[in-house]
Image (spheres, coloured by chain):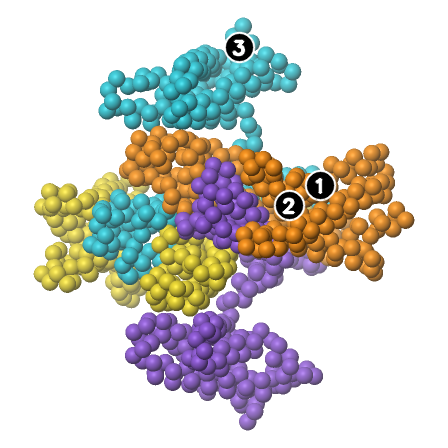
Chain colours: A cyan, B orange, C purple, D yellow
Amino acid sequence: MKKRIFEIISKADEGDRASKIFDGFIMTLIALSVLSIVLESFASLALKYRQVFRIFEYFSVAVFSIEYILRIWTADLLYPNEKHPRLRYFRSFMAIVDLVAVLPSFFPFISIDLRYFRMIRLIRVFRILRVLKLGRYFDALTIVVKVIKKSASQLIVSIVLCCFVMLFSAIIMYSVENPVQPEKFPNVIRSLWWAINALTTVGYGDIYPITPVGRFFASIISLVGIGIIAIPTGIIAAGFTSVINEKFDETKEDEKRFCPFCGHKLD
Amino acid sequence: MKKRIFEIISKADEGDRASKIFDGFIMTLIALSVLSIVLESFASLALKYRQVFRIFEYFSVAVFSIEYILRIWTADLLYPNEKHPRLRYFRSFMAIVDLVAVLPSFFPFISIDLRYFRMIRLIRVFRILRVLKLGRYFDALTIVVKVIKKSASQLIVSIVLCCFVMLFSAIIMYSVENPVQPEKFPNVIRSLWWAINALTTVGYGDIYPITPVGRFFASIISLVGIGIIAIPTGIIAAGFTSVINEKFDETKEDEKRFCPFCGHKLD
Amino acid sequence: MKKRIFEIISKADEGDRASKIFDGFIMTLIALSVLSIVLESFASLALKYRQVFRIFEYFSVAVFSIEYILRIWTADLLYPNEKHPRLRYFRSFMAIVDLVAVLPSFFPFISIDLRYFRMIRLIRVFRILRVLKLGRYFDALTIVVKVIKKSASQLIVSIVLCCFVMLFSAIIMYSVENPVQPEKFPNVIRSLWWAINALTTVGYGDIYPITPVGRFFASIISLVGIGIIAIPTGIIAAGFTSVINEKFDETKEDEKRFCPFCGHKLD
Amino acid sequence: MKKRIFEIISKADEGDRASKIFDGFIMTLIALSVLSIVLESFASLALKYRQVFRIFEYFSVAVFSIEYILRIWTADLLYPNEKHPRLRYFRSFMAIVDLVAVLPSFFPFISIDLRYFRMIRLIRVFRILRVLKLGRYFDALTIVVKVIKKSASQLIVSIVLCCFVMLFSAIIMYSVENPVQPEKFPNVIRSLWWAINALTTVGYGDIYPITPVGRFFASIISLVGIGIIAIPTGIIAAGFTSVINEKFDETKEDEKRFCPFCGHKLD
């Protein structure tokens, strides 16, 4: 019976109807879960259908909890050669996602103490991470993940570079603009908010330099921002190019890689 | 005679003068159609030349309708080996474009019931899709379409990824900012408007976070926005690189791909 | 003597001192010309040094005019085998630049009729095109120009695509937003201003949709904007990749392209 | 003893504990230095912990100064075959960074003359450059630096191109908008601020054209802005592609580059 449960909760094989129904049920529940978070944000709906939202939440948390427990329980069938299969599964990415998708709901729904109300609200937001549970059912993400993994070390370098440029920009702009508009640039952290918006070219327009020196530095920072965007774009583009070429080479493998007159592998 | 009509409405062969005149006429009518939509939007012009716009619209709809009927009628010459050539043509992309270009105009010009006025206005906007009819006459789109088709599956993955990040950002920002500025972030849908503007780096400046926590998350979301832009850019760049290299290889095909001393194909 | 003049006004050969002085003189004059346009825009400077600016302008126009006439005159030494060398030179890109750099200054400096004042101001702006004269002295632009030329047909397709998407967006947004905020979206042309700012992700924040339907369409248009940016970026990236690879191949040409045992060219 | 000091201040070898402690100490001091700049920007903290900030600053400047002197002193061990090893080291990039990281602190902390107060503040900002000292300890930057160096000449061309487009845009927009909104476009320099924000697609919304002609030119400039961003992105993407391919080729070198039947190097 344990083996059957494992088959059902695993991704459905061709022809396994029970497993397919289970997959469909979980995917529907995830979608409804996200929809309920969106709908609950409308104050009128949240008030009117309060009971419905609450019952649905109880129900979905119960289902996801049972699913999580079953997955832990059947972990020894997933890793048959592992010494501690449950611990191994417990630390896997999908298991952490499953746990995070359920945990926030175990915090009380309406806090007794109003001071913690906002923090709990924020924790409950992480229910949206349930969407990541869908990852189990989609293979298409693989190539994107592969490219990002392949370029990871360079992406991290470009992010660190980016953070340094931001901090540097923020400190310069704070020094220049703070004496003129202290309410907009009161400290480096607030100045950092401006720097991020300038470098990512969002530019809300709530904070901007007004002194000539400030504008001069802001101009240079904006131009650097183009480069900042160009580096990760370049890395990812290069990653996709090499991954796509690889695939392209693999498909041509059989017809071309042999010397046409002696049969040795050539290229 | 049917064969002659088919030749005329098809893309002109070298030297077929009647067909060339027909093509030119349709292209001019499409251009004038778009121009009339633009001009009609100026209230003063719309009032003054109301009759002119109306007559021109009747005329162009009549022409496009006849063109559409003729194309359906001569579909059996386009697909001579098809069993149901008209049905086949009816479902082709260009036939759907032709239909959509004409359909909105069969809705009454001025609605009797004012409540539906805006909806009908919106429907009539789709007359602009007539521009797509021009696609028949331009070959240059092919390479762009080819690249997009080739990268379609990855582009869809990156769009889905993008939508998830947006929804996630919107829910977080709603939770954080709603208590402080409820009129700007009244619900997740409005918060989604902010998230899209932040992630696409448009940043109108009508909605932005004002709490430190909100700014912190907004900063992270903006940085993620760079990545979100980098992925489709990378995919499309990789697509163009491989398509261009392919073409490059093809042109060099004859001069290089043979073993110089035994004549076998080499590479 | 004509041959000597031709040598002097041509790009300096190694060791030709007169020619080098001439090049340096023209380049300095171009730089000062641009500087004077910038300085003249400061109202106080323009008033105070009015005579200086006027005399400098007269002087530089005189020099550039003489240079232009000399280049036309010596054109037969540049194209010795051409039938109409002067006509040929007259239509070359650099000759047109030289002409455009001088022409605007032959319009009267201060218009008698105030109605044409602004138009003449605008024409005088084209004096800035003198900077293009510098192109004669820089070789580094070649690779950028080469890439753009190579990708020209695809870039044009992507620009046409872009223009269509903009027009389409503008017409939709006009239909949706005009009834609610007629002063912001009075006609399709003004709506086009919004569309361009949204698709290029500039987002000044002077015009933005406020209706839910408008925001929905604006969101989709912003997302399409990412793609619109991705296509030319992808094209140019692919162009640079293939140009750089080509150069890379050329440098390795000699050491690798021969069959190591029979001497025939291999790859 | 000099040799031992040289070993300690150089990047730590495996197993050299004293050197590792020294590296860790310097890295911690750099991090604390940056943190102190950020914290000092909060007026309340700066006032309350004024003495702490001052003492920490004295301490870190002392340490960095001693480090700098020791590095200069042991330069002859770094370049044993050089004639003037200290001069050689003095002009190296890292030595300049070390000097710049220390110099600003030798300016008086609070200026006697209030007129120079802001300038001194700005100079003290360059203390943030201490972060660059970290570069000594990270190898991961190498590939990014390599790509940027490889594409340097093209990047410079694209930056020059960019500057020209900006100046040109600024002059056009000044001519068009100055008569209508003289307070927003008072001169070309202010207009340049607009041009940079439009071309980098930041768009704060503090300055934007309001005349139809101005909007027409601004639209074209925004579209050109996409191209301006596309060129460096394309260059960097191409750079990464070729660097990554190179590395890829190197790893496959041994197994593939030899003719399988005669042993000669093939490709």
Task: Single out the mark in the foreground, 1 or 3.
Answer: 1
Disc 3 from disc 2: Cα separation: 56 Å
Chain letter of mark 3 equals A
Q: Position of residue D244 (x, y in %)?
A: 51, 48
| Residue underneath mark 2 | B127
- Chain at tag 2: B
Who's the residue at 44% across and 41% down the image? C210
Please indicate whether residue B38 sits to the left or right of residue A101 in the image.
right
**Amino acid marked by disc 2:** Arg
How far separated are the C-alphas under marks 1 and 3?
Answer: 52 Å
Drawn side of residue B60 relative to residue B171, left or right: right
Q: Which three-letter amino acid code belongs to the residue tagged 3?
A: Ile
Where is residue D195? Give x, y as percent.
41, 60
Secondary element at image label 1: helix
- Per the image, the residue denoted by label 1 is B99
Q: Do the residues at pointers 2 and 1 share their chain?
A: yes
Pick the front one: A165 or D2: A165
User: Which residue is outermost to the right?
Assistant: B1
Q: Is residue A200 visible?
A: no
Q: Nearer the viewer, residue D191 or A16?
A: D191
The answer to whether B203 is drawn above or below residue C145 in the figure is above
Quadrant position of residue C160: bottom right
Residue B25: where, in percent of width, then height? Answer: 74, 56
Determine contact: label 2, label 1, CB under 8 Å.
no
Q: Amino acid at mark 1?
A: Leu
